[in-house]
Image: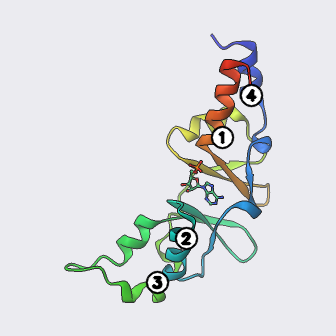
């Protein structure tokens, strides 16, 4: 059975918990794989959002996608990096949250994703919700303390 407190948490809008877009490292779909490799390496994140020039969410890019795009039969073809565009190697089929979604929907999705991108009603990128933040909130509710 779900307790009253848990019901309150599950019904909460995710907007209170997101890391807002200006604090999120991202790349643009027209950027080169070389630029994206630099961003991923410098930030230390395993995967980051891909946006278009109008800040609309296009997909996700990870280090693995970059490495796979330059994997030759015998060696890694680093010289190809400047000519590969991010939108040709990014993952386009991604789970997305809306700003108005509830904590419950986010909880279901973070089981399989370390973080989720959040968009507004026009598809403009609003930020991300991480598994870390969701777990912190859950812990707070379980122990009933900060
Ligand atoms: P964390 O909760 O810090 O362990 O982050 C989990 C994952 O969320 C990271 O590996 C990144 O893929 C993504 N992430 C977290 N914070 C940011 C950020 N500020 N900018 C871009 N991606 C982020």
Q: Nearer the viewer, mark 2 or mark 3?
A: 2
Disc 2 to disc 3, C-alpha distance: 19 Å
In percent of width and height, residue 49 lies at: 61, 63
Regarding mark 2 in the picture, which secondary structure is present there? helix
Q: Nearer the viewer, mark 1 or mark 4?
A: 4
Quick one: label 1 or label 4, which is nearer the N terminus? Answer: 1
Quick one: label 2 or label 3, which is nearer the N terminus? Answer: 2
Quick one: label 4 or label 2, which is nearer the N terminus? Answer: 2
In percent of the image, x 38 and y 89: which residue is there? 79
Pointer 3: what residue? 84
In the rendering, which numbered label is found on residue 133? 1
Regarding mark 1 in the picture, which secondary structure is present there? helix
Q: Quadrant of ligand 1?
A: bottom right
Pointer 2: what residue? 42
Disc 4 to disc 2, C-alpha distance: 32 Å
Quadrant of the rendering where the N terminus is positioned: top right
């Amino acid at each position: 059975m779900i307790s009253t407190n848990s019901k309150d948490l599950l019904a909460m809008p995710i907007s209170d918990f997101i890391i807002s877009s200006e604090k999120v490292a991202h790349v643009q779909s027209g950027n080169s794989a070389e630029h994206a490799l630099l961003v991923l390496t410098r930030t230390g994140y395993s995967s980051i959002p891909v946006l278009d020039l109008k800040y609309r969410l296009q997909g996700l890019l990870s280090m693995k996608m970059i490495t796979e795009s330059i994997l030759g039969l015998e060696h890694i073809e680093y010289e190809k990096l400047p000519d590969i565009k991010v939108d040709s190697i990014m993952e386009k089929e991604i789970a997305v949250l809306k700003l108005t979604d509830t904590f419950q929907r986010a909880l279901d999705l973070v089981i399989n994703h370390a973080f989720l991108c959040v968009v507004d009603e026009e598809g403009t990128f609003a930020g991300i919700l991480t598994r870390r933040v969701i777990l912190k909130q859950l812990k707070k509710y379980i122990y009933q303390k900060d």
